[in-house]
Image (cartoon, rainbow, N blue to C red):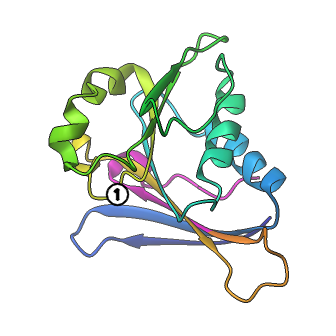
Amino acid sequence: MEAAHTDTTGTTGTPTTTARLTVHSPEEMQELGRALAGLLRPGDLVMLTGELGAGKTTLTRGLGEGLGVRGAVTSPTFVIARVHPSLVGGPALVHVDAYRLGGGLDEMEDLDLDVSLPDSVVVVEWGEGKVEELTDDRLHVVIDRVVGATDDDRREVTLTGVGARWQGVDLVPR
């Protein structure tokens, strides 16, 4: 995993912290998830953006391992949301796939994520434009395939911590 790190302030004046990483394999993507889990705490919202097959669920699987939750983390596409309780006294992982939800926050409110959020880590795949209003603070993870790469598994991952919660947090895994 290769990393570059920059801190910026968002165009709306909202504090942001950004890190960019290159991930070379699904194993490294899962390792990134395990490392990011160490930064997460109850109340954190993680938005995952990337095309089909980019590695969103693989990253979430690593988050689940790092958080020590029960159950296999798989794509919740058809059930929309899965709750994975902690086995170690930490926060539960609520894993949501908003791909089939088109109604924005109104449709997301039916899932009661605002009730789960204070006590859990909520990870939403395909959440961009749908869940930002849940909280002022969120970690937005964008996963892009590297175009023209000889290695089909290589991904560019941009981590953006939005809001005061993420200000000053080093997003680059060690």
Q: Is residue 18 above or below residue 110?
A: below
Q: Is residue 104 visible?
A: yes
Give the residue drawn at x 60%, y 15%.
86
Left or right: 20 in relation to 120: right
Task: Write down the quadrant of residue 43 in the picture.
Answer: top left
Kindly identify the residue that appears in the image at 21 percent across and 70 percent down: 12
Q: Nearer the viewer, residue 26 or 170?
A: 26
Foreground residue among 35 and 83 = 83
The percent position of residue 88, horizontal first and vertical second, equals: 67, 12
Q: Is residue 138 left or right of residue 169?
A: left
Residue 31 location, x and y as percent? Answer: 78, 47
Q: Quadrant for the N terminus, please.
A: bottom right
Q: Does 145 sit left or right of 14 as displayed?
A: right
Residue 134, by quadrant, is top left
The image quarter in which residue 135 lies: top left
Question: Label 1: few (<14), some or many (≥20) within 10 Å?
Answer: some
What's drawn in magenta, residue-wise?
157-174
Horizontal side of residue 168 vs 64, given as left or right: left
Would residue 163 be counted in the magenta stretch? yes
Is-magenta flag for residue 9?
no
The answer to whether 13 is drawn above or below residue 86 in the figure is: below
Residue at the far left: name it.
Answer: 106
Residue type indicated by callout 1 = Glu
Query: Label 1 belongs to which residue?
Result: 128
78 shown above or below 152: above
Which is more toward the observer, 41 or 67? 67
Q: Position of residue 119 (x, y in %)?
A: 40, 19
Q: Point out residue 89 in the picture as x, y percentages from the top left corner.
A: 60, 10
Q: Secondary structure at mark 1?
A: loop
Q: Residue furthest front?
A: 78
At horizontal 51% and vertical 35% (from top left) the residue drawn is 76
Residue lying at 26% horizontally and 62% vertically, measured from the top left: 14
